[in-house]
Amino acid sequence: MSVLTDNIARAEAYLARFAAGGVLNHIGGRSQPALSGETFTTISPVDLKPLAQVARGGAADVDAAVAAATEAFKTWGKMPGSERRKILIRVAEGIEARADEIALTECMDTGQALRFMSKAALRGAANFRYFADKAPQAEDGQSLRTADQLNVTSRRPIGPVGVITPWNTPFMLSTWKIAPALASGCTVVHKPAEFSPMTAKLLVEIAEEAGLPQGVLNLVNGFGEEAGKALTEHPGIKAIAFVGESRTGSMIMAQGAKTLKRVHFELGGKNPVIVFEDADLDRAVDAATFMIYSLNGERCTSSSRLLVQETIYEAFTARVAEVAERIKVGHPLDLETVVGPLIHPEHERKVISYFDKARREGATIAAGGVKMGETGCFVRPTLFTNATNDMAVAQEEIFGPVLTAIPFQDEAAALALANDVQYGLAAYLWTNDLNCAMRMTDALEAGMIWVNSENVRHLPTPFGGVKSSGIGRDGGDWSFDFYMETVNVCLPRRLHHIPKLGG
Ligand code: NAD
């Protein structure tokens, strides 16, 4: 049996339970269909065949999940952090034990290649481990003294929170939000993306098998405008952690306004990778191509705009085109595959529409620009050259393995191009000139900047964007600031003067 056939057989075995029993909601420790009994079909982007029926949750399911999360918060929110830590470490162990199942299920549900997804499953466990270890310090605060008073701050979990996630790397992104929420003492209602619902169900099962009390993590599947909207409007939900498109973020802000929801948004990006002529060009080619063609380019931090100094533009983009042409597109469970099928025909149509836009706007298609095969959402890794920054392919988030290359003359021009988009999530800078790097990193409008590096995450560092790319930061203590309320207690240090009134 080849590795691919073996992987497909294992994936089919894992998926059989969903094919037979559907993807259910999970509320207060119980797996259950939507209260309306309605379902929708999730398909595999590999061959567009149905994988399972999914519970189509709505306002009534959200109500039930919020009630369960509210009840569970009474004990989970009061449990010492050291106790929560033990349970969350066991969740991490449970994820590691089922990493193969998570990775294969996610590949079939999303089309992401296994070579990247197996790491993403383990990253999910790392997220749990990291925030578990921080749980005992979650309540910590500061002591701020004046001559008269001692102010002591501490943090309390905010209450039940809603977590709404997208389809690109659903398992890892869910853990990235849910682990800190649970570590801080919040309870959670999770609404995963309708295109990729499966691994969210695995997560809640793993968590409860590891000892997470019932009702602490609840799952409501469904569409954004139904279950998602109901969650953002629910008065029992104190905050919404959302990862998805910028325009959805703005809808959620409006929906949550009536109940004064606290929001944390990780949104879209059109991230520049800026290559100066003095850079280590071999490493820059590898990093730029990795950051756009891995994970199908369906990645918020993908380096989707390649800004190259004009003196090396032709040679550099020729090398990128060569890499793009060599990349294997194929079945996500084939370990040779770099680019698998895009998530859904709807998204594939969007990505392909940019091939036509690029042609119409006068860019050159230096690699790819074509669909592959009759069935499944496969497109070739694509490079547009001779683009200008006003083109749609330079301004809009395509969210596929599609790179737009633009030449620049000097540092000032590079900076102007880099900042001239509505987004500001990440930027990648390639130069060996330290002074140039310092000037550029001071002025780039991005929440995260990597110098002479691809995106390497260090969990204690802040993650998030500026401009239309988001509000708030995740990672380290920043996550706790979102899921917790800071309370200040002021104590007298001596019998200070208190003004007397009316005497
Ligand atoms: P999306 O905004 O369409 O959907 C995300 C989630 O929001 C889904 O669960 C969806 O059902 C829900 N939703 C949709 N409308 C809603 C509404 N009115 N109320 C409440 N919930 C609603 O995003 P997507 O297409 O699933 O994901 C791709 C996007 O996610 C890209 O823009 C990408 O850049 C972004 N993303 C950002 C980050 C980051 O960290 N900044 C990470 C990954 C993905």
Image (spheres, rainbow, N blue to C red):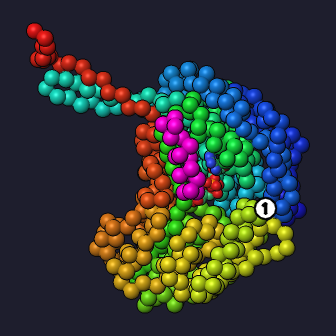
- Residue positioned 84% across, 48% down in the render: 52
With respect to residue 467, does 451 lie above or below?
below
- Residue positioned 82% across, 43% down in the render: 39
* Residue 4 seen by the camera: no
Tell me the kind of residue under disc 1.
Pro
- Residue positioned 67% across, 80% down in the render: 356
Q: Which residues are magenta?
A: 245-261
Quarter in which the N terminus is drawn = bottom right
With respect to residue 226, does 354 lie above or below?
below
Quarter in which the C terminus is drawn = top left
Instruction: Give residue 321's position: percent from left, percent from top.
Output: 61, 83
Mostly what secondary structure, the magenta segment?
helix
Residue situated furthest top in the rendering: 503
Answer left or right for 99 relative to 452: right
Please name the residue that numbered disc 1 is placed on.
Answer: 45
The image shows a total of numbered marks equal to 1
Instruction: Give residue 300's position: percent from left, percent from top.
Output: 56, 60
* Residue 193 seen by the camera: yes
